[in-house]
Image (cartoon, coloured by chain):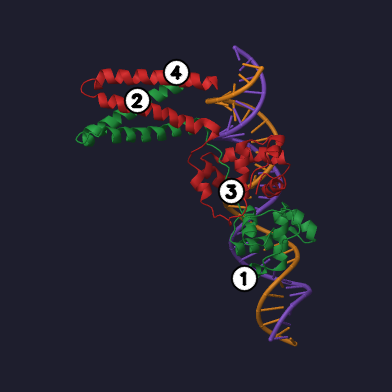
Chain colours: A red, B green, C purple, D orange
DNA sequence: AAAAGAGTCATCCTTTCGGGTGATTTTTCC
DNA sequence: GGAAAAATCACCCGAAAGGATGACTCTTTT
């Protein structure tokens, strides 16, 4: 995490330099308000990056595509069996793909939903299929349920 | 690393320029600094989030919306929703095939298990897929669970 | 600096699936 | 007995899925 601080500092310094350069070139006359706004912008941009980067995704684009599916009742909450997941070496991205496979989406649809190519989806599928010991996607879904990876 | 800073700086500078151009065009009359700063903050927070998620190649959100469903192995406590089945005109044989599809068997394996040809399995599949409104077997499984036809 | 892990994307090739169509044989029910 | 429903099987064709492999980028770790 020291690396994050370092990068943050470097980026921030460069940004401030750029901003000051811009200010000296064009804005120094009569516009102290913009400098203030720019500083706010920098702070919030950093905050946004921190938000977007931490934990591999707090806010992003695809939830509406995924969440738009109908919700089957309001049963008890499901939580992934993290022991199983880590024991099998299944990454978060692979589990994400497996979840969409279980919802009946095709590889192409998953790619559209997650903004990646169909080939990437196929790669993730192949890996997670191998990890759960399946040779078909329906089998992978069944195995995922048995292993507590899917609701 | 440094390329990021460079891109960030350039893009940020361009954005600031655009914002200021917009201000020159439309906002110069009402110089309410707080609103202006807040707008910049929101825009740049979104920009930062976009940047953050770009590098990470998306994110994984664990969908917490799940269906109520526990016994995954067809354990005790599940009974087929006969109303749904009859309402959709699904025959017993078709439901049988659908059950094996949900277990992850291929058409060939199902044929072997039920002592019929693969072509017959495909015919049953096509019919039941049409009846539950699915175009893929994984989708049919999901629909079957939603409709109370599968555990 | 090097290595490892994760994610992304691509190509080639084979198998499986799914749609459409047509047909024959049971089974069920009036 | 005959109609209707269900089950069975076959063929063709296009699309989807899956396996194998290689490569590139970014991040974290060593």
Real-space Cα separation, disc 1 to disc 2, in angstroms: 64 Å
Work out whether residue B53 or residue A113 is closer to the camera in this orientation and state it: B53
Callouts 3 and 4 on one subunit: yes
For marks 2 and 4, the one nearer the N-term is 4
Mark 2 — residue?
A: A39
For marks 3 and 2, the one nearer the N-term is 2
Mark 3 — residue?
A: A106
Mark 4 — residue?
A: A10
Task: Report crowding for label 3: few under 14, some 14 to 19, many 20 or more residues within 10 A (C-alpha).
Answer: some
**Residue B34 in sight here:** yes
Q: Position of residue B44 (x, y in %)?
A: 38, 32
Callouts 3 and 2 on one subunit: yes
Real-space Cα separation, disc 3 to disc 2, in angstroms: 45 Å
Above-or-below relation of A38 to A14: below
What numbered label is drawn on residue B87?
1
In the image, is B1 to the left or to the right of B86? left
Q: Chain of mark 3?
A: A
* Residue plotted at (69% across, 68% down): B91
Q: In the rendered structure, are the residues bearing label 3 and label 2 in contact, judged by CB atoms less than 8 Å apart?
A: no
């Amino acid at each position: 995490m020291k690396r994050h601080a370092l990068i943050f500092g470097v980026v921030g310094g460069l940004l401030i330099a750029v901003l000051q350069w811009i200010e000296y070139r064009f804005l120094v006359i009569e516009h102290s308000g913009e400098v203030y706004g720019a500083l706010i912008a920098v702070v919030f941009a950093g905050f946004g990056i921190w938000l977007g980067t931490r934990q591999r995704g707090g806010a992003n684009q695809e939830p509406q595509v995924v969440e738009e599916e109908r919700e089957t009742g309001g049963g008890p909450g499901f939580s992934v069996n993290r022991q199983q997941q880590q024991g099998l070496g299944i990454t978060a991205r692979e589990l994400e793909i497996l979840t969409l496979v279980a919802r009946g989406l095709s590889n192409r649809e998953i790619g559209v939903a997650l903004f990646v190519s169909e080939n990437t989806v196929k790669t993730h599928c192949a890996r997670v299929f191998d990890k759960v010991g399946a040779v078909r996607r329906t089998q992978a879904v069944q195995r995922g349920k048995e292993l507590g990876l899917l609701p």
